[in-house]
Amino acid sequence: MSDQAPFIPSAPDEDPIPPAPWRVFRIPGFRLLFGAQVVSSMGDWTGLIAILAIASKVSTAGTGIALVMVARMLPGFVLAPIAGVFIDRWNRKTVMVGCDIGRAGLLLVLPFWDNLLGLVVISFLIEVLTLMWGPAKDATVPNVVKDPDQLASANSLGLIAAYGTFPLGAVFFAILAGISKWLGDINYLGRFHQANLLPLWVDALTFLVSALLISRLVLDERERGVIKRVSASQTWTDIVDGLSFVRANPLVRGVMVGLAGGLLGCGMLIPLGALYATDVLGGGRSAFGLLYFALGLGGAIGVVTLLWLQRRLPREAVFTTAVVTTGSALVAAGAVSSLTPAIFLIALVGAGAGCAYVTGFTVLQERVGDDMRGRTFATLYTVVRACLLLALVLGPLVASASGSIANATVNGSVSFGTVHLSLPGARLALWLGGFITILSGIAARRRMRMASKADASNS
């Protein structure tokens, strides 16, 4: 099995990002894969909202919601290395089809498990299957697309399918919940909340549609060689080999460091958005909503801009520049005190983050061999989840601690001549997050330069 990169541009003047990104839809396999992503993602958002709605009713004080979210996050920390080995060993189309069918089955039986324990168990099992499906899909994209010039387009559209369907899922849930409630109580389901019945079963149907679409894919997985049964000890060896590969490969480490630092730093904006809108900008709920709208819109603009304007820049440079730009925009957003410039800067944060996310995935798909791709993406998913969760936890803590320190040392404000600047905790936390992101981009650039020197010396 070759560990060489599957996609290497044949000429230095070759465009790393295609001038006509919609041409990726001419690939029949990609149309099937993209359709499966759109359908299952919209259903997944619908189902998640329904599960959270049930959790809020079967428990008090938010305990159910917290336990469900823990159940959704835990598999990513515990099972990702093992999942990566299986993805590299098994037929990936079979993995995705099986995971879709399994998720559909779990959602179909959920109405009969209307207690908190059943909700947590089913949420955990759904996330285990999702953890297998996601890396298998990302590892399959190069085998479907084949043309390296179309990878960025495929990843951008995949990102839109995964996250752009969230508002559609929310609207879909509201409509289905209303229809389900209008149909009346279904007595044979006992105490189950009938308003969530239709959303969950329609979500199950979306996974079955996704399984049908993926089953029609024709994949060439010969690069990994013949897939054989191996012992449990070999499974452990494969896990160690995968982690060693991630640790030893400077390019892979660079992508991991850049995405990890970016999520850890800029992820603080998510829990601190409300505090930032009130304590720094002096706004209210409307300002809070506008900021999150700007973040999402900026992410969409970043993905589209990546496809159209960065045609002759190497992807490694695009990735690290996007990470540094994201951190710089967050620092600048923390420095302003009015809503209008904050909206533009937060949009820039979203644009940089979207660009970095897509480019990072594309770099790994191009430069990691098919025999290691599943384990690499499983590790990346773990890093992404861990850093995002850490940002959600640390953001409020850092804001509270830094605000207390500023009040105790400089009375909560500083002056530079005629300029007076207050120092609420949210502002200081965003500055810290921005600097962490900038440093992660610089560290990623150093590692990618190491990879480029190593490639040059080996050629």
Image (cartoon, grey):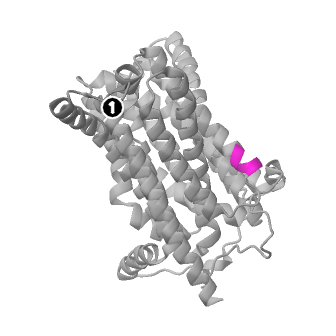
Pointer 1 local density, CA inside 10 Å: few below 14, some 14–19, many at least 20: many
Point out the image quarter for the C terminus. Answer: bottom right
Task: Work out whether 79 lies above or below 210.
Answer: below
List x then y, in percent, for residue 423.
30, 30
Say whether residue 57 is left or right of residue 19: left
- Taking depth in this image into account, of 260 and 6 the one nearest to the observer is 260
Q: Secondary structure beneath disc 1? A: helix
Q: Position of residue 134 (x, y in %)?
A: 53, 54
Task: Give the x, y percent position of residue 140.
Answer: 63, 63
Task: Give how far across and how far down residue 162 sits, in percent.
Answer: 58, 43
Residue 331 as seen in the image, left or right of residue 164 = left
- Relative vertical location of residue 270 with respect to residue 193 in this rendering, above or below: below
Magenta-colored segment: predominant secondary structure: helix
Q: Which residues are magenta?
A: 305-309
Mark 1 lies on residue: 426
**Residue 67 sits in which quadrant?**
top left
The residue at 44%/19% (across/down) is 194
Vertical placement of residue 256 versus 249, above or below: above
Q: Quadrant of the N terminus?
A: bottom right
| Residue at screen point 52% across, 76% down | 450
Do we see residue 349 in this rendering?
yes
Residue at position x 57%, y 34% in the image: 347
Give the amino acid type for the residue marked by disc 1 in the picture. Answer: Ala
Residue drawn at point x = 56 percent, y = 21 percent: 176
Task: Indicate whether residue 389 is drawn in magenta.
Answer: no
Residue reaching furthest left? 408
Find residue 81 and report its image quarter. Answer: bottom left
Find out whether residue 306 is within the magenta segment: yes
